[in-house]
Image (cartoon, coloured by chain):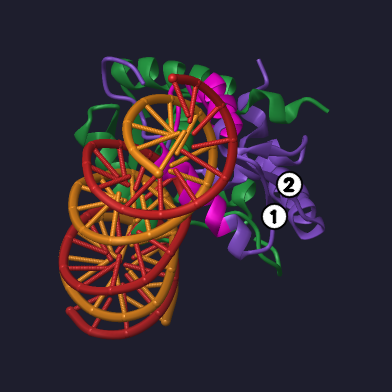
Chain colours: A purple, B green, C orange, D red
Amino acid sequence: MGGYYECDMRGMLSFQILWLLSKGPMHGEEMAKELERRRGEKPKAGTIYPALKELRNHKLIEGKREGKTIVYHITPEGRMSAKHSLKYFVRCFGDMFEG
Amino acid sequence: MGGYYECDMRGMLSFQILWLLSKGPMHGEEMAKELERRRGEKPKAGTIYPALKELRNHKLIEGKREGKTIVYHITPEGRMSAKHSLKYFVRCFGDMFEG
DNA sequence: AAGGTAATATAGGACATACTATATATTTAA
DNA sequence: TTAAATATATAGTATGTCCTATATTACCTT
């Protein structure tokens, strides 16, 4: 992040991906670019695809090959998970945004 | 968190601790209770004290024994780190709070 | 058909966050 | 002064998030 020491902020990747997909379908590269816009750095292939696989394994997302890309969309279970996870997230970190 | 599968939300512990200490000094148990209020579950001793040690090692916080407890307070470096980390956090997750 | 590019995938490793369990230190109660 | 309670600390283990490779797949040129 910066030149001096700051807290490590790894984590929340699958949650953030699921949240993005709750806004609409997307393929892996698009997702990486969306994350880059927020995080400053683009997650590498070895980061994003294992995360997508995990989400797929838990049936929170599904992928459909469309030519060169695989378009992912959120499942009903995924939507429930995103909703509850967001609620938890706000409870956890909500007061950091006040002020 | 819930009864069914949700995204893992581990991470951000040291950031959250540092943010709490930017609001005022606190000892370990108080901190654990503050975190419980937000996360729903109280972090165990084996979770919180290693995190405090790490922050101390990086000179972002300092501890002073006061009788039974050790009261931690943020250092100037810690305050800078908290400020920059919060900025990054908002950039990363800010739009999840809209709506 | 052959080569190049873009997108996806996997192997192997590092590290912070978690846990359980155990140990130590300090205060309070009996 | 033991005993119990509270606070802090550490050892050992597991897992998700990251990385750097490397490999595969599908499309597009030529």
Q: What is the x, y in percent for residue B74?
A: 36, 25
Which image quadrant: the C terminus of chain A? top right
Q: What is the x, y in percent for residue A21?
A: 71, 40
Looking at the image, residue B20 sits to the left or right of residue B59; the answer is right
Could you tell me which secondary element the residue under label 2 belongs to?
strand
Residue A92 visible in the shown view? no
> In which chain is the residue bearing label 1?
A
> In which chain is the residue bearing label 2?
A
Q: Nearer the viewer, residue D16 or B94?
A: D16
N-terminal of the two: label 2 or label 1?
Answer: 1
Residue A62 is labelled as: 1
| Labels 2 and 1 positioned on one and the same chain | yes
Looking at the image, residue C1 sits to the left or right of residue A12; the answer is left
Q: What is the x, y in percent for residue D6?
A: 43, 61
Could you tell me which secondary element the residue under label 1 belongs to?
strand
How many angstroms separate mark 2 from mark 1 (CA)?
6 Å
Residue A23 visible in the shown view? yes
Which of the 4 image quadrants contains residue A66?
Answer: top right
Residue at 70%, 24% (x, y): give it. B95
Which of the 4 image quadrants contains residue B57?
Answer: top left
Which image quadrant: the N terminus of chain A? top left
Q: What is the x, y in percent for residue B46?
A: 34, 60
Which of the 4 image quadrants contains residue A87?
Answer: top right
Q: Are marks 2 and 1 in contact (CB under 8 Å)?
A: yes
Residue at 69%, 57% (x, y): give it. A60
Q: Which residues, given as a range, are shown in magenta?
A: A30-54
Within the magenta stretch, is there residue B35? no
What residue is pinned by disc 2?
Answer: A73
